[in-house]
Image (cartoon, rainbow, N blue to C red):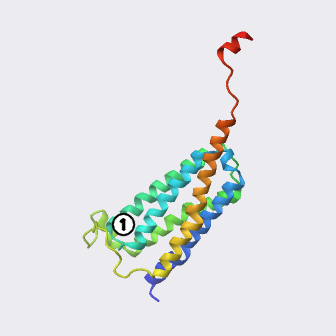
Amino acid sequence: MEPALLVRSYVLYFILPLWVIAGLTDYFLHRHTRIEHTSGTKESVLHILQLGEAGIPVVVALLFDINALVIGIMLFALIVHEGTALWDVYYAHTRRYISPWEQHVHSFLEVLPIMAVSFVTVLYWHQFLALFGLGPETPRFVFELKTNALPFVYLVTLFGSIEIFIVIPYGEEIWRCIAAARSRRTHKPSEPSATRVASQ
């Protein structure tokens, strides 16, 4: 098998499934620390942002031909994702316990997107260079469905796994955080009125 095909298979059948596993593991670690009672909705929103920042370029790269436009989207999303990940940890570390296990899982969630984008960049090097006005090719800034589409079974399996093991769990997480915040507001003791304070 040619090296390019090996790298492509490595991304499709190792890096992407590993990303799903790491994301699901991180969800259970958040749940274990009772995120809804600690860092709460704000951190959960950051998780949803990271899901979008990682998920959108994955969908685009799987469905459309890789060109300068797609590579540009992937690079931009990668930079934003890494920034959001740093923001997430900065916000959470003073509000809930982040175990060594969770920190280790975070390392996967931060590095795997870098690996995936790096491999795609190498495989489509001329379009990467063209993005910056370099190399022998003209940059293509258009969405074109893949000429050789990925196997239908693969796409259904991957997208189904993302829905079941990522989207639904993190949707449950933010729902749980919102519900806990509402419950706290409902059961919060009312402030004594000014009249009552004065009478005391």
- Residue 35 x/y as whole percent: 66, 49
Residue at the spot 65% in from the left edge and 57% down from the top edge: 103
Q: Quadrant of the C terminus?
A: top right
Q: Is residue 65 left or right of residue 181?
A: left
Residue 197 lies, with reference to residue 134, above or below; the image says above
Query: Toward which corner of the image does residue 197 lie, by quadrant?
Result: top right
Q: Which amino acid, mark 1?
A: Val
**Image label count:** 1
Residue 199 lies, with reference to residue 69, above or below; the image says above
Q: Is residue 84 left or right of residue 34?
A: left
In this rendered view, identify the residue nearer to me: 66 or 162. 162
Local packing at callout 1 (Cα closer than 10 Å; few below 14, some 14-19, many 20+) is: many
Q: Which residue is mark 1?
A: 70
- Residue 169 x/y as whole percent: 61, 60
Can you name the residue that lies furthest to the top here? 199
Residue at the spot 67% in from the left edge and 13% down from the top edge: 195
Residue 151 lies, with reference to residue 18, above or below; the image says below
Q: Is residue 23 left or right of residue 2?
A: right
Q: Is residue 148 left or right of residue 105?
A: left
Residue at the spot 45% in from the left edge and 56% down from the top edge: 79
Residue 147 in view: yes
In this rendered view, identify the residue nearer to me: 176 or 23. 176
- Residue 14 x/y as whole percent: 56, 76
Can you name the residue that lies furthest to the right here? 200
In this rendered view, identify the residue nearer to me: 116 or 198. 198
Residue at the spot 70% in from the left edge and 50% down from the top edge: 34
Residue 93 in view: no
In this rendered view, identify the residue nearer to me: 90 or 153. 153
Helix, strand or loop status at disc 1: helix
